[in-house]
């Protein structure tokens, strides 16, 4: 069993990325979602008047429960933050494109969905 993560632990990690990129992603709501069973993390946004509006970050209970080592959880947090930052910088949904991957490199995040043997994924 590894470290269990609180919302404040996640926010603390996101504040590091805020400082790197000059963003305020750590101020978005962070939710622990007990219903997420196949994804480990998610950045949610909506489109209003053709503009991206950040909504929240969600992480599965599995992600924060201590099932994964610290480096894996940090990678998941940074990956989701990179989605927020890429969309915010480029003013459109970037998916896993080159712009997103460039942000991943800046914050030390894996640039693609990470598939596990048990089917869990980050995206």
Image (spheres, grey):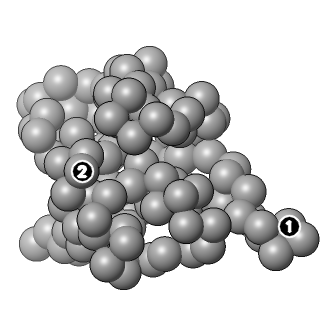
When asked about the image quadrant of residue 119, the answer is bottom left
Query: Which quarter of the figure is the N terminus placed in?
Result: top left
Label placed on residue 48 = 1
Sequence-earlier tag: 2 or 1: 1
Q: Can residue 121 be seen in this view?
A: no
Label placed on residue 33 = none
Q: Is residue 111 left or right of residue 23?
A: left
Q: Is residue 94 visible?
A: yes
How dense is the environment of label 2, judged by Cα within 10 Å: few (below 14), some, or many (20 and up)?
Answer: few
Q: Residue at x 89, y 71 (%)?
A: 49
Q: Distance from label 2 to label 1 (Cα)? A: 28 Å
Residue lying furthest right: 49
Q: In this view, does 102 lie to the left or right of 22?
A: left
Up/down of 14 relative to 93, above or below: above
* Position in image of residue 86 (x %, y %): 46, 61
Up/down of 115 relative to 106, above or below: below
Task: Give the camera-side residue of 67 and 18.
Answer: 18
* Position in image of residue 44 (x %, y %): 61, 58
Up/down of 83 relative to 14, above or below: below
The residue identified by callout 2 is 106
Q: Residue at x 38, y 28 (%)?
A: 19
Task: Give the camera-side residue of 82 and 58.
Answer: 82
């Amino acid at each position: 069993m590894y470290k269990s993560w609180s919302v404040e632990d996640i926010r603390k990690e996101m504040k590091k990325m805020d400082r790197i990129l000059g963003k305020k992603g750590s101020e978005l709501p962070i939710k622990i979602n007990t219903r997420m069973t196949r994804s480990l993390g998610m950045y949610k946004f909506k489109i209003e008047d053709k503009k991206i509006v950040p909504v929240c970050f969600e992480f599965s209970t599995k992600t924060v429960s201590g099932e994964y080592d610290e480096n894996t959880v940090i990678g998941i947090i940074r990956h989701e933050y990179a989605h927020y930052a890429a969309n915010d910088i480029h003013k459109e949904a970037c998916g896993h494109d080159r712009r997103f991957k460039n942000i991943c490199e800046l914050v030390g995040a894996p640039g693609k969905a990470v598939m596990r043997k048990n089917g869990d994924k980050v995206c």
